[in-house]
Image (tube, rainbow, N blue to C red):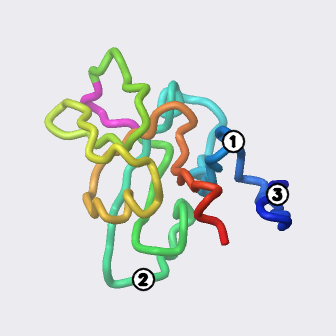
Amino acid sequence: MCKKDKSYFVFDTNCYLENDSVIIAYAPPLKSDSDTGSFQKNGIWFYSEHYEDNKKGNSVYSVSDVGAKLSVDSVPKSLKIKQLPKSEGIYFFENNTLKQISSIQSEDAFYKLNKNGFYFLPNTGRLFEHIKISSIE
């Protein structure tokens, strides 16, 4: 619960205080068919197929209801990376390298990328948003 100017706000179960002025709001976790595996070590690997025909999305692996089909139980076959990134962001596997293609690890940033292929989300392996408490009305 958060108090702002004589008002109280109740957080969703996926929201946490990062500090006294910022809330982290996590997107739903990516669904997986298994509990462990190399695709979940130090983050999470997933394969994404973006599509524009269906604005709602109907995949069991969708992180939200717009524009992508995600498969979490996937790791690139040619993966030879020894050191995975730990910095916040969205990483894309291309030409046997992992490149940061967004420094923001949010759903909006992910859907703007619109690239088919393997992605890596470091640390918690979740998409999230930083919300400044001062922006809450």
Q: Is residue 25 left or right of residue 86?
A: right
The residue nearer to you, when weighing 67 against 20, is 20
What is the distance, in whole Å, between disc 1 and disc 3 at their CAs?
11 Å
User: Mark 1 or mark 3: which comes first in sequence?
Assistant: 3
What is the distance, in whole Å, between disc 2 and disc 1 at their CAs?
37 Å
Q: Position of residue 100 (x, y in %)?
A: 28, 39
**Residue at 45 percent of width and 58 percent of height:** 70
Q: Is residue 73 left or right of residue 33?
A: left
The residue tagged 2 is 55
Looking at the rendered structure, the secondary structure element under dot 3 is strand
Q: Is residue 108 left or right of residue 128?
A: left
Looking at the rendered structure, the kind of residue marked 3 is Lys
User: Mark 2 or mark 1: which comes first in sequence?
Assistant: 1
Provide the residue span drawn in magenta. Answer: 75-79
Considering the whole magenta stretch, tell me its main secondary structure: loop
The residue tagged 3 is 3
Q: Residues within 10 Å of mark 1 (few under 14, many from 20)?
A: few
Looking at the rendered structure, the secondary structure element under dot 1 is loop
Residue farthest left in this picture: 95
Residue farthest front in this picture: 5
The residue nearer to you, when weighing 129 against 22, is 22
Looking at the rendered structure, the secondary structure element under dot 2 is loop
Q: Is residue 29 above or below residue 38?
A: below
The residue tagged 1 is 20
